Amino acid sequence: MSDGDQITAAGSSFSFRCPKAPSRPGLEAASTDATVYEIRKVTCWLVVADIQDSTQLLRNSRAEEAPRITGRWLSACNRIIDQHQGTINKFLGDGFLAYWLARQETAAAVAGALLALKELQAQGSLVFRVVGHYGEVLAGGAGSLGEESLTGNDVNFVFRAEKLAAKLGTLRLLSEPANAQLKSLLPTILEGRHDLPSYQGKFAFFSF
């Protein structure tokens, strides 16, 4: 039966009423305005920076002092990345992951950022490592800062390389793909070929 149909019973006629349920704007808006995040493969520069012995820093500093020290450092790094057209995708508590989409002019910007981070290291206010890599990532969704989420084998690779830098005792390290793109812009030194956990074979790395 539909709204308005006539019903006859015992000589009397009645109209069947079945009004439509009221619309629910909130639900309609949620369904029509839902954002679909596209996942795509892109070539990126990836830079990870990480404070060396951050646990020791916390132990040796007053409770209110350590956050100020790390905050000033993160602010200085953020300015460097921003001034060189990069983006910090994720803060890691005692470090960050930054990226640049690979374009013709990007290598020079990345080299400038790495040199500026090297200069910040030389100031000695905080000891930290810097590791650079060049590869393909899956980009899409929402990152921790409203930017795109970056995932994939090469993202994992740069974090493994940062652990290698700690093991080697070097503050600055580049993967072989990154070095190939930067060698005309940034003097580097071969640090040998090394294993990385979960990756087959040995990989060349360079300090700068």
Image (cartoon, helix red, strand yellow):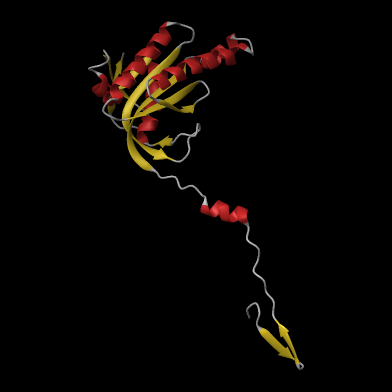
Q: Is residue 85 visible?
A: yes
Q: Please state the total of marks drawn on the protein image.
A: 0
Above or below, 38 against 150 in this view is below
At 48% from the left and 35% from the top, the residue drawn is 143
Give the camera-side residue of 93 and 53.
93
Name the quadrant of the N terminus: bottom right
Give the camera-side residue of 150 and 19.
19
Q: Position of residue 158 (x, y in %)?
A: 37, 27
Q: Position of residue 32 (x, y in %)?
A: 52, 54
Name the quadrant of the C terminus: top left
Q: Quadrant of residue 173?
A: top left
Give the camera-side residue of 20 and 92.
20
**On the rendered structure, is 97 left or right of 135?**
right
Q: Position of residue 138 (x, y in %)?
A: 37, 39
Q: Residue furthest left?
A: 184
Q: Position of residue 187 (x, y in %)?
A: 26, 12
Above or below, 171 against 195 in this view is above
Q: Quadrant of residue 4?
A: bottom right
Q: Residue furthest bottom?
A: 11
At 70% from the left and 82% from the top, the residue drawn is 15
Q: Is residue 170 visible?
A: no
At 28% from the left and 25% from the top, the residue drawn is 105
**On the rendered structure, is 203 left or right of 70?**
left
